Image: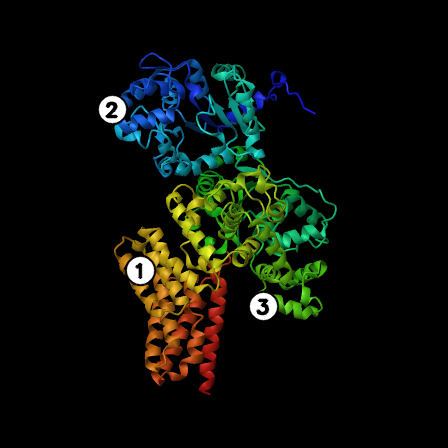
Amino acid sequence: MKIQIDVQNLKLPPVNTEEMLRKIGTGKAIIFTGAGFSKKAHNTLHEEPPLARELSKKIGSLANLGDNNEDLMYTSHLYLKHGDRLALLKLLKDSFVLMDVDPSHEKICSLPWRRFYTTNYDNSIELACRNIGKRVDSLDIEAKPKDYISQDGLCVHLNGLIENAKVDDLESKIKLTNSSYLSPQSFISSQWNYIFKRDLETASAIIFVGYSMYDMDVQRLLYQTDNLIDKTYFIVHNEATFQETFLLTDFGHVLPIGVEGFSSLIAEKFVQPNPQDEGVLLECFTAREVKHVNETITDTEIRDLLLFGKFNESQVDTTLSNNYQDFFLIERELLKDTIRLIENKNNILVHSELGNGKTIFLNLLSSTLTQKGYTVYSFNEASEYDDELAEIELIVKARKQTIIIIEGYSRAERLLRHININFPDELTLIIADRSAIALRMTQFISTLELKFAEVSLDQLTNTEISNFIDLLDNQGLWEELTALPYDIKFKKIKDEYNGQISGILLGLLKSPSIHERIRKITDELFENQLFKDTIFAIALCDIIDTHKTSSLISEISGNDSIYKMELRNNIYFKSLYRFVENGNAIETKSSLMSLAIINNCYSESYVKHKLLNVVKTFDNLRSISHESNKLFKSLLRFHVLEILLPQKQKALDSYYMELKKVCPWLKDSPHYWVQYAMCRISIGDTESAQTYLNDAYTLARSKDDYHTENIDTQQARLYLVKCIREPDGNKSFELFINAHNILIGLPDNGYKYRQIIPYKDVYDFKFKLFNKGNKVTFEHSCKALLKQINLTDHNSDDLTLIKRISFINKSKFILEDIIEKISSTRL
């Protein structure tokens, strides 16, 4: 039976215009204008700027093709190839350099837009803004985002701007022809595409005005994801047909009111929000609310947490209310200590290594503090142009007992400086990061007046280990170890897993049944190459600890699958990951599961080549945001590569060899040669390692104020490696003393103490080959280092102790043992 569709009676869904204007009023909306926006503006010929078809006719007439050819691609390409380009440029300037705009343009431009984007060649936005005393800078997509991204008042012309164009710009900057659209300078392949995707994610509203399907295919800009559809609006002309608007409804709300109607709507209903009003929406911070949704937590939810890192705040609240009796989480003894520190007016710095429970600990902490009457906000890792500084002032003005949690505080230097200067006494801060990053941030933290008490989560107490054993027994996850007695399980966690959550979870992930379960999921997903690349991008973000936004994942993977419902609704994908409430980022956080996926489900060739592609991409993007810069720098560091390519020495060496081809400027970087040397040391190539360290020293000396401690540390390490390998006793001692003289003079930090650990091997394997005088010197050297260690200030609040404390303790034990054994031989 045929179904009759009466198109005449089909209507567009209603649009809540008050909600749209409220979103614009936050100052976080972006506007995208097409050719229809500029109607009623006038150029130097006192005409409206032509639309694409009319422009094609003008160019056709100029080329003696007649004035009825509407194919702009054809006429412009033909004219550029065979015509007078100066005449074409004059035609374009006469057509698109505007002399006046309509009041409706001024009204629309007066709204607090975060950014203007346009496919138009004309200067309607700039002129309208100038008329109302609003400054806006014009850019084309060849401009480097890093030079402009932090400033307000930008208008990005995707197809170029005619006003200041030159003849040479007609091939590249002014997008008229098919070849221009396909050139490497086109918007889709430009750095601005990444910025635009980030703007889509963080915008409160996305407004298209005067947009036409002829301007640019909307599917190249937008994605049919719920979070974007809900905040996207198309202002189309009031005589638009159902056919013209039907496809747009797949991407957002459609208002057929035209530019003038939109202007009238603004004049009638837009009210500039008062920042002092109660209920102003905070977007950079989220207030913690305690919810008890589940009476009990299921075994499936517990396994999803342990294996895939899946949990939500209501589950945390539930396990607290159940006093941990549901075996979902273990009670961390540091939780009570941390709360006591906060009640005594301390700021807190929480740190842990990868996979040791930092995120869950912060959730337990925020839930407990909220129940105690504190107002707790979490920082949402705002991007550089978000309004966290203005929002923190609103929070302070509420005059409540307020705590701010900043996970990944290395991303929030600007916010921390602002609080340090303006509100050091009004807020309590809980900042958290991975231990290695916290160590690198020590110098920055020391510049603040704010003082922090340190909380390290890496080591489980004996009670916590016992509770973890009970949790695993309850889930039957021990497999072949299930029948072992309690004390054997305890010893396994204490010794084999180093008393750390990460060790336990890695052990689970390596078990045959869990490994097979993950492999089955990834095999299904990897049948689609785009999905395979996207999963790799998500896993990489997890391991490096960058915020997993869709824009970043898309850029790493080199495709837009992360936006597609085909992937988002895939049952296998959802078994691994889930999105945050607004759909802009991946919420699930299991760096260990992601590490297991990369190590076990991708070939070493794939990982190496994909990482090199990522480095190449982010070499151009590293100055745009903290996340892109962190990603780029991380993929230069040997300790990160060693995790991503474990036991793959040939691939690691090949990676560093090809890295300088991908980024030629690295050849002039001391840091690169140090990392390459570390790679060569790891595979036993001491000769190449020494060459690369020599290169690093030479380059470092050519740079002003370049500190060589990192190079010195690796040089000492290399001397010790050579010392242990050298069969000749005198030469071996000479290498030892070279290493020792470097280490004794290095600053008191974690990198230094790690290199003292090989002294044990020197004693065990080489001491007996030393002559009598050298043996005495070796003993005195050990005593001198031990004296240094004993003089170290072990203040628990000293941030310089982050991560190095384990190396201090281990090196101290080794030196004491060596000295005792030498002394005992003299008795």
* 407 relative to 701, above or below: above
Q: Which residue is mark 3?
A: 496
Task: Report how far apart the C-alphas of labels 3 and 1 lie in the structure.
Answer: 37 Å
Q: Which residue is mark 2?
A: 86
Residue type at mark 2: give it: Leu
Tell me where residue 497 appears, x and y as whole percent.
58, 65
Q: Is residue 274 visible?
A: no
User: Mark 1 packing: few (<14 Cα in 10 Å), some, or many (20+)?
Assistant: many
Q: Is residue 369 left or right of residue 605?
A: right
Residue found at the far front of this picture: 1
Task: Report how far apart the C-alphas of labels 3 and 2 lie in the structure.
Answer: 76 Å
Q: Secondary structure at mark 3?
A: helix
Residue at (49, 72) in percent of width and height: 813
Nearer to us: label 3 or label 2: 2
Tell me where residue 20 appears, x and y as whole percent.
55, 24
Task: Report how far apart the C-alphas of labels 1 and 2 lie in the structure.
Answer: 52 Å
- Of the image marks 3 and 2, the number of the one nearer the N terminus: 2
Q: Which residue is mark 1?
A: 696
User: Mark 2 packing: few (<14 Cα in 10 Å), some, or many (20+)?
Assistant: few
* 479 relative to 623, above or below: below
Tell me where residue 384 appears, x and y as whole percent.
44, 38
Quarter of the figure with residue 721: bottom left
Quarter placement of the N terminus: top right
Q: Secondary structure at mark 1?
A: helix
Quarter of the figure with residue 248: top right
- Of the image marks 1 and 2, the number of the one nearer the N terminus: 2
